[in-house]
Image (cartoon, rainbow, N blue to C red):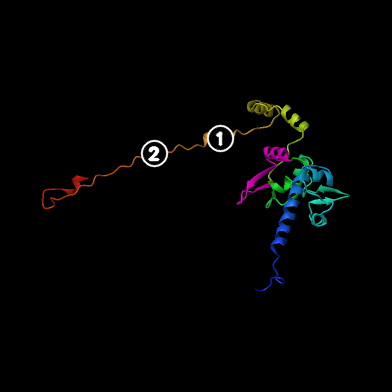
Amino acid sequence: MASNRYSPFPSYKENSRARHINSYIHTIIQFIKNYDRPLTFDEIEKNTNLKLTDNKKLLKTLTKNPKIVIGDNTLLFKPLYNIRNEKDLENIMVATNCEYGIELEKLLDSPIDIKPFVQNLQKKAVIFVLKDIDNSEIVFYNKLYLPPANDKIVELYNKIKIPNYQDVLKELSSAGIKVERKAQEERRNIVVKKTKIKKYKRKIKITNTHVKELNFNDLD
């Protein structure tokens, strides 16, 4: 039986170790992402039952993960998008290409819960969320969105009184400005089309053409 000592494929034990390390990292990330601060190795061990101090291979793998910042016996979750408030989310969406959008799951990796920000911006029509083929949700910026006007401008606009049309005509007339009333001119120019009654002549088929006394001119 040939030995598999030189096989390019890893052994079952090596595969098991890789799976274990990946599951450990997933467990650690899911825990530390809930905190907006560095967590000590002791805190992580108490909540995940994973020892980091003595596990050099696990620590080495953690250093390669872009979502984790390793400090002096501490781990800090580093999200792709550091969203702290609703304005941060809006700025990120404005800066992105609206044709592609951003996966909602990546946005939710922020250090705080941003679901209220997403819902509020949806209500304002600043963003909209669509589902992809795999049911993942993609957030897009609404490029047709226009920010609301300043409160002072809105207040001044609401104070403007719209005058009656007849009062405007009288005011213009008193100022010597002649106003053409298009409505009246249009009424005068309306052409009433008379429906013509077509007269149809009844066709008569003459069969007694052999009668000499019959005068065909009398039939008209």
Q: Position of residue 52 (x, y in %)?
A: 82, 51
Which image quadrant is residue 157 in?
Answer: top right
Whole-number angstrom distance, CA of label 2 to CA of label 1: 24 Å
Which image quadrant is residue 63 in?
Answer: bottom right
The residue that appears at 73% across and 55% down in the rendered structure is 20
Magenta residues, start to end: 114-139
Secondary structure category for the residue under label 1: helix
Residue 121 is one of the magenta-drawn residues: yes
The quadrant of the rendering that contains the N terminus is bottom right
Q: In the depicted view, which residue is nearer to us: 170 or 54?
A: 54
Q: In the depicted view, which residue is nearer to us: 55 or 199?
A: 55
Is residue 40 in view? no
Give the residue furthest to the front: 1
The residue that appears at 54% across and 36% down in the rendered structure is 186
Which image quadrant is residue 152 in?
Answer: top right
Left or right: residue 196 versus residue 85 is left
Q: What amino acid type is highlighted by mark number 1?
A: Glu
Q: Which residue is mark 2?
A: 195
Secondary structure category for the residue under label 2: loop
Q: Which mark is residue 185?
A: 1
Q: What amino acid type is highlighted by mark number 2?
A: Thr
Q: Earlier in the sequence, mark 2 or mark 1?
A: 1
Q: Position of residue 196 (x, y in %)?
A: 37, 40
Q: Position of residue 83 (x, y in %)?
A: 78, 44
